Image (spheres, rainbow, N blue to C red):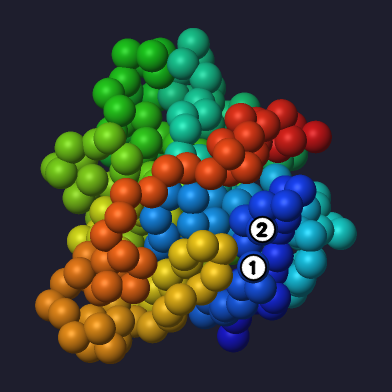
Amino acid sequence: MLSIEVHNLQKRFGDLAAVQGVSFGVEEGSIFAFLGPNGAGKTTTIRMLTTLLKPTEGTILLNGVDPVHHEDEARKLFGIVFQDPSIDEELTAYENMDLHGVLYRMSRVLRAERIKQLMNVVELWDRKDEIVKHFSGGMRRRLEIARGLIHHPKILFLDEPTIGLDPQTRNHIWSYVKGLNKEEGITVFLTTHYMEEADRVADYVAVIDHGAIVAQDTPEGLKQKTGVASLEDAFLSLTGKSIREESAGSIDQMRMHARVWRR
């Protein structure tokens, strides 16, 4: 059964075609890596999947729900950890979790139960009453992941969840994510520039470049098709070695995502 279905997805910003006819499916309960160079269209795609942008053309289904026409229903189905930090640094860890539960209209009893469960999973329960601005980057990321799961989502979107973290913290983050994926059966959709992460955790990989999918397969399948030993080398074989810049359209949309999310 497919948890995410995307057919002929397109997004244009004036004359710029940021996403061009993208199609893929994500199996329920799997970990799916969506990879691409800067400006390739992955950020625009993930924003369409999470109701932050409306597609120019094409269809999306999240567990059978169309997020374009049923935004509120779709948002109940997924949690998201943005690339940029989005927690309130002036609140405690518990208050951040509790506020998110209130936004999803969870009862006080259910919120308390779920907060304790998730903060124990990410090893932050003993720090629950501390102000977040005193947390390390890794602790904040773990809190954001726990917060994104408070309402029992079916899908978890992770947009560059370990960017800027040291290798030890990155390994811990992925241990938590893989454990949650296995224990709760959550479908994980991730973007990352760390190819070794995708190689290690993803069941399936799609590579996007210049707004179009250029390859889809398991990590091992992509390595075999390109005749290389690592996913990073397979990625470079598929997308080239030239340095990319973030597209203007992607940057503009990144700046507005917080405002759109609060609609």
Who is closer to the viewer here, 149 or 25?
Answer: 25
Examine the image and state in which quarter residue 62 appears: bottom right
> Which residue is depicted at the point 40% across and 18% down?
132
Per the rendering, the mark at residue 61 is: none
Give the position of the C terminus as an image quadrant.
Answer: top right
Extreme residue in the right direction: 69
Three-letter residue code for mark 2: Ala
In the image, taking residue 75 as reference, residue 66 lies left or right, namely: right
How far across and down, in percent of the image, does residue 114 sit?
52, 44
Is 214 above or below relative to 112?
below
Examine the image and state in which quarter residue 177 appears: bottom left
Residue 57: tell me if it is visible: yes
Contact flag, marks 2 and 1 (Cβ < 8 Å): yes
In the image, taking residue 73 as reference, residue 218 lies left or right, namely: left
Disc 2 from disc 1: Cα separation = 6 Å
Tell me the crowding category of disc 2: few under 14, some 14 to 19, or many 20 or more residues within 10 angstroms, Cα based.
Answer: some
Who is closer to the viewer here, 49 or 177?
Answer: 49
Give the position of the N terminus as an image quadrant.
Answer: bottom right
Three-letter residue code for mark 1: Gln
How far across and down, in percent of the image, does residue 112 sit?
54, 35
Residue 31: tell me if it is visible: no
How far across and down, in percent of the image, does residue 166 sit?
18, 37
Who is closer to the viewer here, 209 or 30?
Answer: 209
Tell me the crowding category of disc 1: few under 14, some 14 to 19, or many 20 or more residues within 10 angstroms, Cα based.
Answer: many
Is 223 above or below relative to 168?
below
Is 27 above or below relative to 157?
below
Helix, strand or loop for disc 1? strand
Which residue bears the numbered disc 1? 20
In the image, taking residue 69 as reference, residue 126 lies left or right, namely: left
Which residue bears the numbered disc 2? 17
> Which residue is depicted at the point 24% across and 36% down?
165
